[in-house]
Image (cartoon, rainbow, N blue to C red):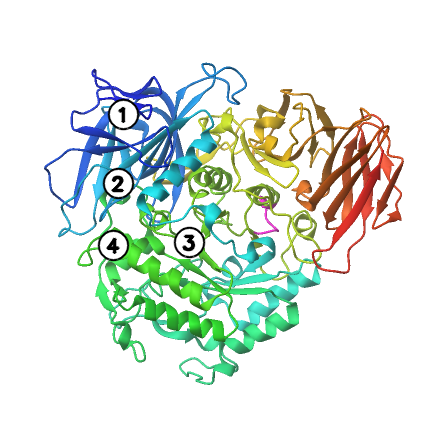
Amino acid sequence: MTVGAGISVSDDGKLMVLGNSILHDVSDNIMVTPASGDALANGAFIGVVSDQMGSRRVFPVGKLEGLRFMCVFRFKMWWMTQRMGNCGQDIPFETQFLIVEAREGSHFGMGNENDSALYVVFLPILEGDFRAVLQGNDRNELEICLESGDPAVDEFEGSHLVFVAAGSDPFDVITNAVKSVERHLQTFCHRERKKMPDMLNWFGWCTWDAFYTDVTSESLKEGLESLEKGGIPPKFVIIDDGWQSVGMDANGTEFKADNAANFANRLTNIKENHKFQKDGKEGFRVEDPALGLRHIVTEIKEKHALKYAYVWHAITGYWGGVTPGATGMEHYESKLAYPISSPGVESNEPDQALNSIIKNGLGLVNPEKVFHFYDELHSYLASAGIDGVKVDVQNILETLGAGHGGRVKLARKYHQALEASIARNFRNNDIISCMSHNTDGLYSAKRTAVVRASDDFWPRDPASHTIHIASVAYNTVFLGEFMQPDWDMFHSLHPMAEYHGAARAVGGCAVYVSDKPGQHDFELLRKLVLPDGSILRAKLPGRPTRDCLFTDPARDGKSLLKIWNLNEFTGVMGIFNCQGAGWCKVGKTNMIHDLQPDTVTGYIRARDVDYLPKVADDAWNGDSVIYSHLGGELVYFPNNATMPITLKAREYEVFTVTPVKILSDGSKFAPIGLIKMFNSGGAIKELRYDQSGTSASIDMKVRGCGLFGAYSSSRPKRITVDSEEMGFEYEDGSGLVTLSLRVPEEELYLWSITIEL
């Protein structure tokens, strides 16, 4: 069977992709359909021909053996993590993304076509009322698992279950594959077409790890004041779980933990509880809106110049849903439902929240009424000065599809209603999607632009920190095509705080902490946040470098994790030793498997920043400079040069990478940025070269304050800032130029810097 898109099943039963065998012993009932229209040229759909019926079916595709792969799979109901392997049996249940190294070669496409690596991406997608995922079996077969989530929904077409695409640039292949699926399904939008909420560009504080559900209006004020006093003013706040009116059924079974909610609780009113009412008392409801949530939101916005205030809620209202028949909420027609999770999820990590909800049931709002529920909730919040919401527990919908046409139909109904309400009630697409790592939701999200990238930051779990950074990076390879991944809050005063902070700086994500009042490391925060509360956010979702895609930086004992991103004129790269802990498929939890991981040596090169040529000019010869944040060293990198880096367990380094510009007089220049900040180059907003004969000048617009650095092959003749001549330092050996920028009086002010050579 020849398909013409470079993807076919050969007569001897091999799945061939651009002349390379990816799977062998392909099942006779597997069909391949080329992508149509303007979709990816090297793309096709895998499907099955079957007369079987049923709400859950598993179909073998073919055997995967001897090829390296990386996949992301759901290790528990809510979240994904990565797995690397080289055969079918290594592919876990609930795999939602798979990339295979079909042919080794130059990782950077520097040689001829036959020398370049070839990457093949498998995207299991939605078809009608069914959702497909991948899994492996002990015969090394790659399988498609197809589920509807409703026993009454048992008929499927089966022709478009998995999209397959291939090419020599892994990131381009993934992006183009997701865009092809976007055109095919027409039920979601790619990240590039979505409006990003402005809160991403400012420093924030979340109440969760500071107070858990014990948060009050007073503790909210304490947290904001504590950070502001240290010169790091939060510009957004997330009032997490603990503000809502909730209660248990009389016969409910309570869940108790000091760092979690009572999952047996249900929403009893859309308005705030007494802790967020002026002079509120438990058991009494204040009906005057001016004395409700509005009073504290108004106060903190005025006192602390907050730009955005978000609150948390579950996609079903609360963990246990909406109390059926609750006074004032009867019109939502909430009914008790009991979740049924899929066998794939059941085979991975058990989950306390899910088990509690299964035991107590969930008050599910009638899908035909759910827009009214969201609209009334969000309208009330907006009237109280709330700007957006963090919507949690989203994957619970997949367990509630029975009687509603299945999981896909129910999820789409809820997500369409949610996004319509967000658009109606909040100005800037202000929503964070959380506990939402299933393709039911991802392939149904047309507007939502921010998604939590991994399981939580667990401040007291030493096994969680290195795997957190690895997971957010690898999950972002997939999630970053749909939304801007949020790498979660962290504590600035914590043994792993710098490690987490450095990762947030290269992640392109929001930067926010969940510090308790008085427990801050302001020196660390100043590497992330400017005095006006803004951050230097990189432009893209941060992802592992190409040479890290198929190595295991958490378990193999020999690999470092390198994460790359771009600014307007520079690249940034974080290097992390993540060895020693990871998700254990036997213990089914994150575990420390090496108490004393070895020191690891790896190599860096400028082109580890994959899209670096995009910020260089057409005449770029490949030379770059690299500045190390911790080392404080500037190194000139000729084209294709490499440099070793050695990190002990739980150590990191951040590098700013800038293409070198060769000027008309033969001198060389490359800006670096604010060198005391993790993402130095994020400060440079405009860059222009003015060359005339034997002299040259560089004009830049730069945001922020502190020590600004650049590389120059010759000592500058003169430097001005806003037309005022400034003193500067110059290191003859390295070519490092530095000058100090004072704190600007205006928010987001851009300094005009001119360097004359």
The amino acid type, in three-letter code, at marker 3 is: Cys
Question: Is disc 4 surrounded by few (<14), some (14 to 19) or many (20+) residues within 10 Å?
Answer: many
Q: Which residue is mark 1?
A: 3
Q: Which residue is mark 3?
A: 434
| First in residue order: circle 3 vs circle 4 | 4
Image marks 4 and 1: residues in contact by CB distance under 8 Å: no
Q: Which residue is mark 4?
A: 409
The amino acid type, in three-letter code, at marker 1 is: Val
| First in residue order: circle 4 vs circle 2 | 2
Q: Where are the magenta residues, as a range?
A: 491-497
Residue 29 image offset from top left, x and y in percent: 16, 28
Residue at 20% x, 28% y is 30
Q: Of tags 2 and 3, which is closer to the observer?
A: 2
Q: CA distance from mark 4 to mark 2?
A: 14 Å
Q: CA distance from mark 2 to mark 3?
A: 21 Å
- Establish if 742 lies above or below 616: below
Q: CA distance from mark 3 to mark 4?
A: 20 Å
Is 460 a magenta residue?
no
Question: Is disc 3 surrounded by few (<14), some (14 to 19) or many (20+) residues within 10 Å?
Answer: many
Residue 91 relative to residue 494: left or right: left
